[in-house]
Image: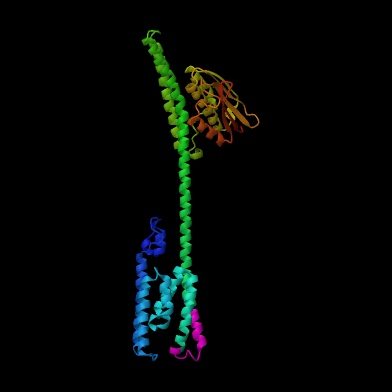
Amino acid sequence: MTVDRWMLPGELARADEPGERSGAYRRTPRDWAVDVTMFAIAALVWVLEFEYYVLPDVFGQPVWARIADSAGGAAVCLAIWWRRRFPVTTGLLAGTAGALANTAASAMILLLFSLALHRGWKWAVPITSVAVLISVPYIYLNFPGADRQPLPWLISLLLGAALVVTAGLAVRARRQVLLALRLRADAERRGHTRELEESRRAERQRIAREMHDVLAHRISLLAVHAGALEYRTAQAEQGVAPEPSAAEVRDVVAVVRTNANQALEELREVLDLLRQQPDGEDGRESPQPTADRLPALVDEARLSGQQVRADFATGLGRLRPQIQRTIYRIVQEGLTNARKHAPGASVDVLVSDVVAGEVLVQVANAAPLGVTTSEIPGAGAGLIGLAERVALHGGELTREISEGEFRMRARIPCTS
């Protein structure tokens, strides 16, 4: 919402400007209008008091008293221009000189109001009380009838002072409420911004995880076939093996093309999923892989030359799609890591049925030579992403090397 800062008091306008220093002082157009109006009223009262009371010497004061009255009134009127920057100083001036000068009556009221507005009751009440005490003997000596009926005069003086201070405190309270609401709104906006940033960061991590899961498997297959063709060609050039036939080259190229197209298709599916509204609000089903595609995944690995023994429980299709997708990604990552870090090693894949409310997913292969029991082959972004996936379901992903075999095991709590 657009805020018309020129209509706000300076205090509120500065709070609405994030780059403005808290202690900076600058009048807004509204402040100028108020100050000019206040000064005009105070000056008008000064002129009227001077013309009708001071010059005719209505109270029978000596010349020096009338001069002091006029000078003091003028000083209090001019102090209106500094009432925001120095509210205590101008309030003290109003409470002392103003209480003894008829020409300062209006300016004194305005300055005491401003003192209560900008400094609160801790300053306004004592200074106003002093002004009342100083005014009592002055009124008693100079106003006719005050010595005969002092009580009405005193009550009127106290009520007037209380009204001025109360009005200033009321305006102050309203501004403080507005400032508190503004601070709360700023805090909520900052909190919302942090939540939005965290959401975006989580989304970026999810996208990176999906991209890795989709592309790493396919690209590793491409690398295996391309590497085999390169090796065969190099052997032929060295004369230690026959040149690959056109049919063999065609078969390898077909596998590479098929996997490249499949990688693009799976990448498109991931991007389509990311463009969907959350929780299927657009009515479309998720295109992400589920448990029924596990046999095809294993067949692809076997076509690339991997020796894979797989044991998949029946009934995995009854699990929630999110859990099925996690199982698929675990098996996919396990096959990819085995292909990258233990080429030629046989891979055992096990996905158990739901037992005691959880499903077991295990991928095992012979550990690469030179890897000690403290090393985890392929412990990169893929495995970190898998651990995050499993943790979202309340499960646990473990990796270990035992008896020369690397095992990746996940236990995922689930219900059919």
In the image, residue 191 lies at what x, y percent?
48, 50
Region of the chain picked out in magenta, as a range: 141-159
Front one among 286 and 54 = 54
Residue 142 among magenta residues: yes
Q: Is residue 199 above or below residue 338?
A: below
Which residue occupies the foreground of this view, 126 or 349?
Answer: 126
Instruction: State whether residue 41 appears in this view.
Output: no
Task: Inspect this view and state whether residue 247 appears.
Answer: yes
In magenta segment, residue 249: no
Relative vertical location of residue 113 with respect to residue 145 in this rendering, above or below: above
333 or 128, nearer to the observer: 128
Colour scheme of this structure image?
rainbow
| Total tally of numbered discs in the picture | 0
Q: What residue is shown at x 40% (from left), y 70% (from top)?
A: 86
Query: In which quarter of the view is residue 393 placed?
Result: top right
Question: x and y percent of residue 345 in the render?
Answer: 52, 18
Identify the residue at horizontal 37%, vertical 80% (top origin): 73
Secondary structure mostly seen in magenta is helix
Q: Residue at x 49, y 76 (%)?
A: 162
| Residue visible at 45% across and 48% down in the picture | 193
**Measured from the top left, where is residue 330 in percent x and y?**
53, 28
The extreme right residue here reads 356
Percent from the top left, x then y, of residue 123?
Answer: 48, 72
Quadrant of the rendering where the C terminus is positioned:
top right
Closer to us: 102 or 273: 102
Q: Quadrant of the N terminus?
A: bottom left
